[in-house]
Image: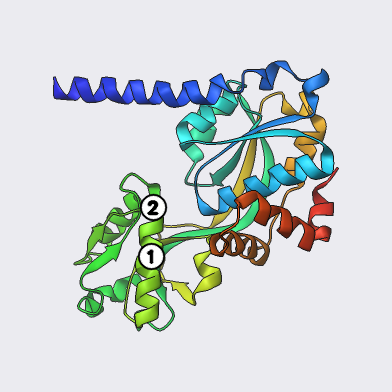
Amino acid sequence: MKKRIATWAGMIAAAGIMAGLTGCSQQAGTSAGGDEAKSADLVYVNWAEGVAYTHLAKVVLEDKLGYEVNITAADVGPAYTAVAQGDKDAFMETWLPVLHKDYVDQFKDQITDLGHVYEGTQSGLVVPAYVKATKISELNDHKDAFDGKITGIDAGAGIMKTTEQVIETYGLDFKLVPSSGPAMTAALDKAVKDQEAIIVTGWRPHWMFGRYDLRFLEQDEDKMMWKTGNIHIMGRKNLQADKPELAAFLSSMFFTDAQLADLMLKIEESDEDIEDVARQWMSDNPDVIASWIP
């Protein structure tokens, strides 16, 4: 009975998220080709990089191309479903070839790949540059320095599941401590200020690489658990036919590591509204923005 209640609760929660995604954007698929063609309905995950460049895309589309733009934060599963069903124009953050492969395979006939917005994603165990350990296989030798723990993020995140596998594969005598993205970076900030040893579950792109001198712990060649990749934007199936200008713009969006780190760090360190920071970044980087506009 407890399992059934949990299942029903999960179904109700998922339905609520989907209702929120579809209820405010029913016109996204029906407006194509008509007076509403200058509209964009984008969905993103509430991760630092996606928050940064989705808000930037919004202000560029509005200020430079005259679009009416709606952006929605959602979990990964509901985001893909909303795009596949045509309720959203595009999902702004598909991590390939590993993290989102199952979703892309599931919805491959209902979505279209608009290309990558960032090259060189990386996930793994991250330490400050002053830490002695350089490899995952060395961690047990430095257990006391790290207090035998790895500071993680949300318990259900993909990087957390992989880290659990890493602990088992490498035989690490460490405990993975779940927290959240903000809590993890707060712990990292305190450790760096106090010059203490810390291991966190980290990924690039992230603003923390712009603020601190960090590095990924090296993996053994026969125990490679994390791979590099790219971040893609996925559009609904008919987006290129319905809204060719929007599709072309999203396909042209691209950041170097330095550009995205700069944007994320400015947003993180500012007390201003995210759109205001994004608009200033747009003004400060006219050549980058010009290269995206069809």
Residue kind at label 2, given as amino acid type: Ile
Q: Nearer the viewer, residue 4 or 120?
A: 4
**Image vertical order of residue 190 relative to residue 175, above or below:** below
Q: Position of residue 148 (x, y in %)?
A: 21, 70
Left or right: 161 with respect to 51? left
Work out whether residue 33 can be spotted. Answer: no
The residue indicated by pointer 1 is 186
Q: Which of the image's four quarters has the C terminus?
A: top right
What's the amino acid at mark 1? Answer: Ala
Q: Residues within 10 Å of mark 1 (few under 14, many from 20)?
A: few
Alpha carbon separation for disc pair 2 and 1: 18 Å
229 w.r.t. 72: above or below: below
Task: Residue 142 in the image: state x and y as whole percent.
Answer: 25, 79
What residue sits 46% from the left and 73% below the top?
215
* Residue furthest top as drawn: 30
User: Which residue is label 2 attached to?
Assistant: 159
- The mark nearer the N terminus, 2 or 1, is 2
Front residue of 152/211: it is 211
Left or right placement of residue 240 versus residue 99 in this view: right
Q: Nearer the viewer, residue 88 or 68?
A: 68
